[in-house]
Each structure stands twice: as structure tokens, then as C-alpha cells.
Image (cartoon, rainbow, N blue to C red):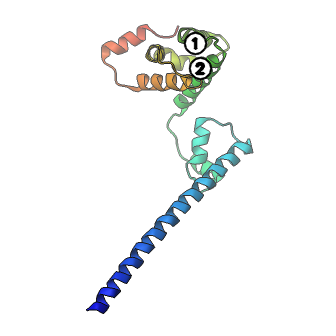
Amino acid sequence: MQELSDKLNHVGASYLEAQKKRQELEESLTSQLAWYSRNEIVEFVRSKRYVGTPVTFAKAMAGLPEYRWLHSFRKCEAIQERSTRHVEYAYQIFELLKVIVRKTKPLNLSKVEVKLREKLLQEDIDPVLRSHIAPKWAYMKQAFAECQGKRFKRSELPYKIMGRFLENSESPRTIAEAELAKRDQLV
């Protein structure tokens, strides 16, 4: 009986040690996969084969760490995608917002809103981009209003405004709210 009890204790201790070793190996593997994935993204950026947009980054990252970035990108190219134009337009608006926030001194949200509006109404701006944001301008104004008085850092502000804008424009609306938004279009 004592012999069985000793064997059981030995097997239990071996099991716990194996579990601990497995957890250490999983943590090590996770760290190595993260390192590999970061290096692949750096390689993607260095390659200069593709413009770094949210869509191209997503394609390069989709298969990581199982595939290299180029293989992942090529596999994603073969997939029929739904329209990603709205993502690219949102990114372009974000980039405009970043530049305007950086250049506006002193930082004043009302001035930033006016400058963004003026920039989007300029003739040299992409007309498709303007037509994308025009019906959603009320939601952009709402985003500025929601960020007013929050004392965000200059570097945080474009992210906060775009985050609120995307939430506002994607949230369900009543018929009355939709009609009010139509009246406040960018024109």
C-alpha cells in the first residue's frame, strides 16, 4: 500500500512539473511568435512594395505568424473583399485631422473643426473623399462637441475625435436624428 502511495505522489509531482514546463514553453513560444510577427511587419514597411494603408497592413498581418508577410498579402489579394473604401477614407480624414491638430496653435477645438471643414471643402481635395464625409458631417461636429473641454493631449486628440466620429456615424439613428444629420451636411 505504501508503495502505491509513493508511486501516486511521484506521478502527481511529475504531472505538476510537466504542467509547469508546458506553461514556460507556451510563454516562450508566444514571445518568439510576437518577435517574429514584429519583424515581419518591419520587413513589410521596409520593402516599399506597397503603400502603408490600414488595408495593406491588415493584409500583411492577416496570416502572421503562420505565414510571412508577403505570402499573407498575396493570399488576401485573392479574397474578394467587400468595399474597403470607407476604411481608407476614414484614414485619410484621420491624417488630415492629425496635420491640422499639429499645426493649430494654440490648440482650440473650434479652430480645428473650422480648419478641417475648410480643408474638406477646398477644390484640391479628393471629391470622392468629400462626398464620403459630407453626409456624415453632423457626426463629426458631434465628435468635436463631445471632446470639448476634456483636456486631451495634442497627440491624443486626433484619435479621440476620430474614435467618437466613427462611433457616432456607425450607431443606430432614429428617423428624426437621420433627418437632422441631413440638414447638417458638409456643403
Q: Residue at x 61, y 40 (%)?
A: 56
Q: Position of residue 107 (x, y in %)?
A: 59, 13
Label located before the other in sequence (2 or 1): 2
**Residue sitting nearer the eye, 9 or 146:** 9
Q: Position of residue 140 (x, y in %)?
A: 48, 17
Q: Residue at x 69, y 40 (%)?
A: 50
Q: Position of residue 163 (x, y in %)?
A: 48, 26
Residue 148 appearing in the image: yes
Q: Which residue is mark 1?
A: 112
The answer to whether 15 is drawn above or below residue 75 in the figure is: below
Helix, strand or loop under label 2: helix
Quarter location, residue 106: top right
**Are the two marked residues, 2 and 1, in contact with CB atoms closer than 8 angstroms?**
yes
Q: Residue at x 43, y 70 (%)?
A: 19
User: Looking at the rendered structure, which numbered label has been put on residue 175?
Assistant: none
**Label 2 neighbourhood size at 10 Å, few (<14), some (14-19), many (20+)?**
many
The answer to whether 81 is drawn above or below residue 104 in the figure is: below
162 to the left or right of 120: left
Residue 77 appearing in the image: no
Q: Which residue is mark 2?
A: 97
Instruction: Look at the image and tell me in which quarter the N terminus lies.
Output: bottom left
Name the residue type under label 2.
Leu
Helix, strand or loop under label 1: helix
The answer to whether 35 is drawn above or below residue 166 in the figure is: below
**Residue sitting nearer the eye, 4 or 157:** 4
Outermost residue, left direction? 1
72 to the left or right of 27: right
Name the residue type under label 1.
Val
Real-space Cα separation, disc 2 to disc 1, in angstroms: 8 Å
**Label 1 neighbourhood size at 10 Å, few (<14), some (14-19), many (20+)?**
many
